[in-house]
Amino acid sequence: MGCEQWRGKLDAYVDGKLDLAEARVLAEHVRTCPACAADALERVQMKRAVQMAGTRYTASAELRNRVSKSLTSKPRRHFSFWQILAGPALGLLILSLATNFYMGRESARRQRVYSELADLHVAALASAAPVDVVSTDRHTVKPWFQGKIPFTFNLPELQGSEFTLLGGRVTYFAQTPGAHLIYQVRKHEVSVFIFQDRAFEDRGEAAASLPSSAAHAFSFNVENWTQDGLRYFVVGDVGAGDIQALSKLLQDAR
């Protein structure tokens, strides 16, 4: 398949709308084609710019207070017997609707977090320099982050596993600095993101409320968990078994 045909699929790729097999083939092409890599990176940057623009304008505290006061200042109404009788049923309906709304909103927030991390993963692989420290030695990569991020972490010994450490870079999520590590397994790259968990809580970010679990986000498998005050995300277009295996190595790292 030529570049022109691949370029027609780049939008679906960065939006996670390709099936897993096709996404893997396109990812392999992007890694070897500078032109398509540049196009993919441009699309990811545009997608993130649109997402940021959508959250730029929010109601001020003053406006929210004015609306709240206008609602509470309305005169009380007198209800008929039938209106009072309908109250419990109406209350149950409202509770059900509110629960569904909350669950839908939380699901959307989780997907937003996973989508942004998938964008960071794609952008790194599409760039000319995916990592700033290039090394397969964990004893070289881990010290490189000292002084660049406000925490430290452990990396696993990979001898006897199918994984190879390619290197790492500093990344940012919700203006929070963290570590972005890239591993390779059978010619496929997997991103590992590490952030301080309390940094998300301080900012009220969606990631702070994410349950520790495995998930499928668009064309990628994702697993996340908290450990020793850090939040880990493992993202890649490999199978769930590979994601879980790398996660287990990271969890056991000392």
Image (cartoon, rainbow, N blue to C red):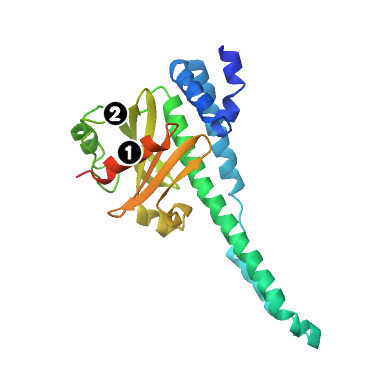
Residue 143 % position (x, y): 21, 38
Find numbered disc 2 in the image and state the secondary structure of the residue it sits on: loop
Q: Nearer the viewer, residue 169 or 136?
A: 136
Q: Which residue in the structure is indicated by mark 2?
A: 162
Q: Which residue in the structure is indicated by mark 1?
A: 245
> Residue at position x 30%, y 43% from top?
248
Neighbour tally class for label 1: few under 14, some 14-19, many 20 plus, Cα within 10 Å: some
Residue 155 % position (x, y): 24, 39
> Residue at position x 54%, y 56% from top?
106
Left or right, residue 184 beside residue 6: left
Residue 174 % position (x, y): 45, 48
Q: Nearer the viewer, residue 4 or 234?
A: 234
Neighbour tally class for label 2: few under 14, some 14-19, many 20 plus, Cα within 10 Å: few
The circle on residue 29 is: none
Residue 212: tell me if it is visible: yes
Left or right, residue 44 beside residue 185: right
- The quadrant of the image that shows the N terminus is top right
Residue 53 % position (x, y): 60, 44
> Residue at position x 57%, y 36% from top?
47
**Contact flag, marks 1 and 2 (Cβ < 8 Å):** yes
Of the residues shown, which amino acid type is indicated by label 1? Ala
Find numbered disc 1 in the image and state the secondary structure of the residue it sits on: helix
Q: How many marks?
A: 2
55 in relation to 241, above or below: below
118 in relation to 23, above or below: below
Extreme-front residue of the structure: 241
